[in-house]
Amino acid sequence: MTWLCAPPHNHGPVKALLLQHFSEERVISLSFPNPWPPRSLHLTQYDFWLWGYLKSLVYRGGVATLNDLNNSITLHVRSLTTRSNTIDLTFCK
């Protein structure tokens, strides 16, 4: 199954869709000005955990508007300090 090693979708229609919704400066891709860093020291397992964890919390209640999304993200990020043991328990398994 060699398709498993395929690069990300950089085909013309995909690029056009990304440009339609975002500017070139906001897209992270090899075919745009901001390439994704192949081995970034700034991206750790905690970053990936945080992304998934926040995403599950934010979308649990449903988000109707962009303002709701921003408020939900802010609320859950601020509550991380009161639930710091959640991070420790997750990585100690």
Image (spheres, rainbow, N blue to C red):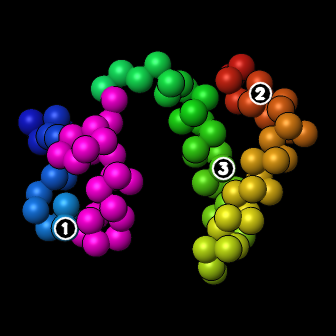
- The residue at which mark 2 appears reads as 89
Q: For residue 54, which numbered disc appears in the image?
A: 3
Residue type marked 2: Leu
Q: Which residue is most to the right?
A: 82
Q: Nearer the viewer, residue 34 or 80?
A: 34
Q: Secondary structure at mark 2?
A: helix
Q: Secondary structure at mark 1?
A: helix
Q: Nearer the viewer, mark 3 or mark 2?
A: 3
Residue type marked 1: Ala
- The residue at which mark 1 appears reads as 16
Q: Secondary structure at mark 3?
A: helix
Cα distance, mark 1 to mark 2? Answer: 43 Å
CB-based contact (under 8 Å), mark 1 and mark 2: no
The vertical placement of 16 against 75, above or below, is below
Cα distance, mark 3 to mark 2? Answer: 16 Å
Q: Nearer the viewer, residue 82 or 85?
A: 82
Quadrant of residue 92 within the rendered picture: top right
Q: Residue at x 16, y 52 (%)?
A: 10
Q: For residue 39, which numbered disc appears in the image?
A: none
Q: Which residues are magenta?
A: 17-37
Q: Nearer the viewer, mark 1 or mark 2?
A: 1
